[in-house]
Image (cartoon, helix red, strand yellow):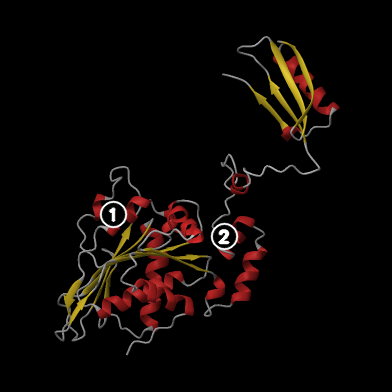
Amino acid sequence: MIELELSDKQLRAFDILDDPEILELLYGGGGRSGKTFLGAQYFILKCLECEGSKWLVGRESLKKLKRTTILSFFKALRLLGLKEGIDWKFNAQESIMIFSRANGSWDNPSTIFFEEMRLLPSDPEFDRFGSFDLSGGWIDECQEVNVAARHVLQTRYSELSGTNCDGTKWELKKGVTLLTCNPKINWIYYDFVKPAKSGTLAKGRAFLPALFTDNPFIDQESYKRGILATGNKRYIERILYGNFDFDDDPLLLFDLDSINDMWTNVLEEKVGKYLTVDVARMGGEYIVVGYWEGWDLKKVYYWKKAKTTESEARIIEIRDRHRVPASHVVIDEDG
């Protein structure tokens, strides 16, 4: 008899995955929430329940898949008491795991295909998945994966019924995709997280947030201390607290807080000092410098075109006169 070791949150995920109305479940948020172990146990159980079924498990890179996801399968198999060579076999070269039937035979085994889901220039539509006939799938760390892989995977679910060795029939109402993730503002945010917050999640989709506090099988306090000790705000917000709204990418023109605040635009009483400079090298006759306190333009300086070194010296003199930080000076020019 197989005994599963699941948290309350993982049990809830099992119920959602088996709900005939749900086609996709996004599970996760924070690190150590048990998301990978959830997937491993769920798909092992499905292989045992539905003899001859076919499943696909993917990550963005095969290297990551082998070093994390597949290792979680081996751990789950041990904990479930399943024996290699008797209950299951793994072909490392092909990255395929098969499960023997209940009568011990390997005829028409249940199969899990472990696949790299990297976006390839030679295969932008993921046509390489077109030959699979599957019963369901799982994309681990799906925030790393191009959304097209998810869409193609959802079209490959056709193995939805079969016969066990004792003659009983099994039938799945639908193929389901498990998506496990850490926070990122991309398709997982716009298709699942944001609509779930507003109550507009599309039919057939579900989002179940999970944090380290939902995992009773780890030392939660030790894990929390370790993350906080890094002092890395991005890591703390995303991995510890599962904050999907946090993004500090240095290439962003605007951070999310600024975008959310665009409709209020309330000024603080203590405003900063700024210089705006139009050097007009390619067009106008004058170089114009504006001195600002917050949104208030306090003074305008201008002079006819001059050598770059001369203009630079005058801008620095104005900046020093008003005690404006160098990082608060913006210069606009064409060319």
Residue 199's spot in the image, x, y percent? 47, 61
Residue 160 relative to residue 60: left or right: left
The one of 84 and 260 positioned closer to us in this rendering: 260
SS for dot 1? helix
Residue at the spot x=57%, y=47% of the render? 249
**Quadrant location of the C terminus?**
top right
Residue at the spot x=48%, y=66% of the render? 28
Residue 274's spot in the image, x, y percent? 75, 31
**Quadrant location of the N terminus?**
bottom left
Instruction: Specify the label residue 152 is tagged with.
Output: 1
| Residue 73 visible here | no
- Does 99 appear above or below 55? below
Say which label, 1 or 2, has the lower sequence index. 1
Residue 96's spot in the image, x, y percent? 27, 67
Q: Residues within 10 Å of mark 1 (few under 14, many from 20)?
A: some
Q: How many marks do you count on the picture?
A: 2
| Residue 174 visible here | yes
What whole-number distance in Å separates the C-alpha atoms at marks 1 and 2? 28 Å
The one of 318 and 310 positioned closer to us in this rendering: 318
Q: Residues within 10 Å of mark 2 (few under 14, many from 20)?
A: some
Q: Amino acid at mark 2?
A: Asn
- Does 270 appear above or below 49? above
SS for dot 2? loop
The residue that disc 2 covers is 243
Residue at the spot x=53%, y=66% of the render? 31
Residue 148 relative to residue 251: left or right: left
